[in-house]
Image: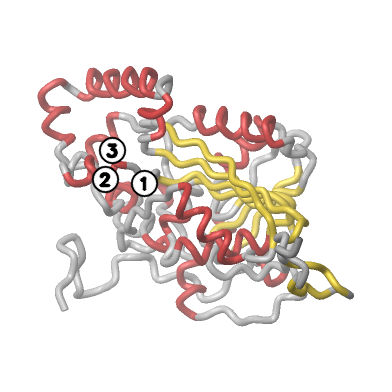
């Protein structure tokens, strides 16, 4: 069985992990959880980042566009800023974005050992940090009003499994920001202007973390679309009505240092020819114009999706003594 060319099989390159973590875990926080965590999951969840890169979450230089799209979603969908929020696989930088939007009650989860990070003080914000596996969170059903993941799902072994966990825990809203699956992005991958695996994140974390489930193995960049989000949701909650709020757009939130890490694409040829500063200026100019054009903006690299759950059943179903039954009168005149 052949290996990917960027991996070696002689020894593991990730930090082996701490056998016991004193960080508050989801299982400790929610006493109703009774499943056990595998040894592999514990190793992943407690693997710290390098001391010189003591950042909780992926490096992102500018998240202002995501903040604006999130704020518009909150306004358009009437999301209560006083609701309880679960930020899955997030960073303190993500929590700060939610604070700027107006949220005040947040729980932050991550696979990483949160004891190595100081929980920042945010005026007027209740912030709890705990270790939890996004694909198997020990949190009861319907524990939070809003469950949000910012560019996290594509780091999971099963992005769909993590999304279903978010749907299970959410009472009303689920929000994700992920890479967009579009004609343009597929063409960019084929022309090697984008790479299907996320190598720069692992390089940035000194080849020890940042990949799939926070290991040294670069994750495949799973791209989402509206139909994919709809089918996944409809399959998991087939009895209930729901709506989708989707925004697709361009957002090249990289700097010249991150551009230098993208040696596996053809971008390096352009940066050598024009220089990184001019190349970035061209990218930002393009995205400003492209986002003004609905179809072109919809071909962008970012996918923002909000699932709005409803208490209403499908019209062919009824509630009877706490059970869901088929409506035998459905379709009859």
Residue 158 position (above or below residue 145) = below
| Mark-to-mark CA distance, 3 and 1 | 8 Å
| Mark-to-mark CA distance, 3 and 2 | 5 Å
Q: Answer whether residue 54 is visible to the viewer in this image.
A: no
Residue at figure coordinates x 63%, y 34% from the top left: 73
Residue 25 relative to residue 59: left or right: right
Residue at figure coordinates x 61%, y 59% from the top left: 166
Residue at figure coordinates x 61%, y 68% from the top left: 137
Q: Work out which quarter of the rendered image holds the C terminus and state it.
A: bottom right
Which colouring convention does the figure follow? secondary structure
| Mark 1 closeness class: few <14, some 14–19, many ≥20 residues within 10 Å | many
Q: Work out which quarter of the rendered image holds the N terminus and state it.
A: bottom left
Q: Callout 3: helix, strand or loop?
A: helix
Residue at figure coordinates x 24%, y 74% from the top left: 11
Residue 206 relative to residue 149: left or right: left
Reading the image, the residue beneath label 3 is 184
Instruction: Tell me the number on the disc at residue 181.
Output: 1
Q: Answer whether residue 76 is visible to the viewer in this image.
A: yes
Instruction: Tell me the number on the disc at residue 186.
Output: 2
Whether residues under marks 1 and 2 lie with C-beta atoms below 8 angstroms apart, the answer is yes
Of callouts 1 and 2, the N-terminal one = 1
């Amino acid at each position: 069985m052949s290996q990917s060319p960027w991996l070696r099989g002689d020894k593991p390159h990730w930090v082996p992990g701490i056998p016991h973590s004193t960080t508050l875990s989801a299982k400790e926080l929610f006493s109703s959880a009774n499943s056990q965590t595998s040894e592999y999951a514990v190793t992943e969840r407690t693997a710290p980042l390098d001391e010189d890169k003591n950042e909780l979450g992926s490096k992102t230089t500018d998240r202002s566009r995501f903040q604006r799209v999130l704020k518009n979603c909150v306004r358009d969908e009437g999301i209560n800023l006083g609701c309880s929020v679960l930020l899955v696989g997030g960073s303190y930088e993500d929590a700060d974005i939610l604070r700027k939007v107006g949220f005040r009650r947040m729980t932050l989860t991550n696979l990483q050992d949160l004891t190595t990070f100081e929980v920042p003080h945010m005026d007027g914000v209740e912030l709890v940090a705990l270790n939890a596996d996004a694909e198997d969170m020990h949190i009861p059903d319907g524990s939070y009003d809003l469950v949000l993941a910012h560019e996290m799902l594509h780091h999971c072994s099963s992005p769909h499994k993590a999304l279903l966990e978010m749907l299970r825990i959410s009472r009303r809203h689920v929000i994700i920001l992920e890479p967009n699956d579009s004609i343009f992005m597929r063409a960019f991958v084929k022309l090697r202007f984008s790479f299907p695996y996320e190598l720069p994140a692992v390089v940035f974390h000194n080849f020890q973390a940042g990949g799939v489930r926070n290991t040294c193995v670069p994750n495949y960049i799973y791209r989402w679309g509206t139909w994919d989000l709809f089918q996944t949701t409809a399959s998991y909650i087939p009895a209930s009505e729901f709506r989708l709020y989707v925004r697709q757009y361009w957002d090249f939130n990289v700097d010249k240092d991150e551009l230098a890490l993208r040696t596996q694409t053809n971008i390096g040829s352009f940066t050598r020819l024009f220089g990184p500063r001019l190349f970035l200026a061209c990218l930002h100019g393009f995205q400003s114009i492209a986002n003004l054009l609905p179809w072109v903006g919809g071909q962008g690299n970012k996918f923002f999706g909000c699932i709005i759950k409803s208490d209403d059943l499908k019209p062919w179903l009824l509630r009877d003594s706490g059970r869901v039954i088929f409506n035998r009168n459905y379709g009859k005149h």
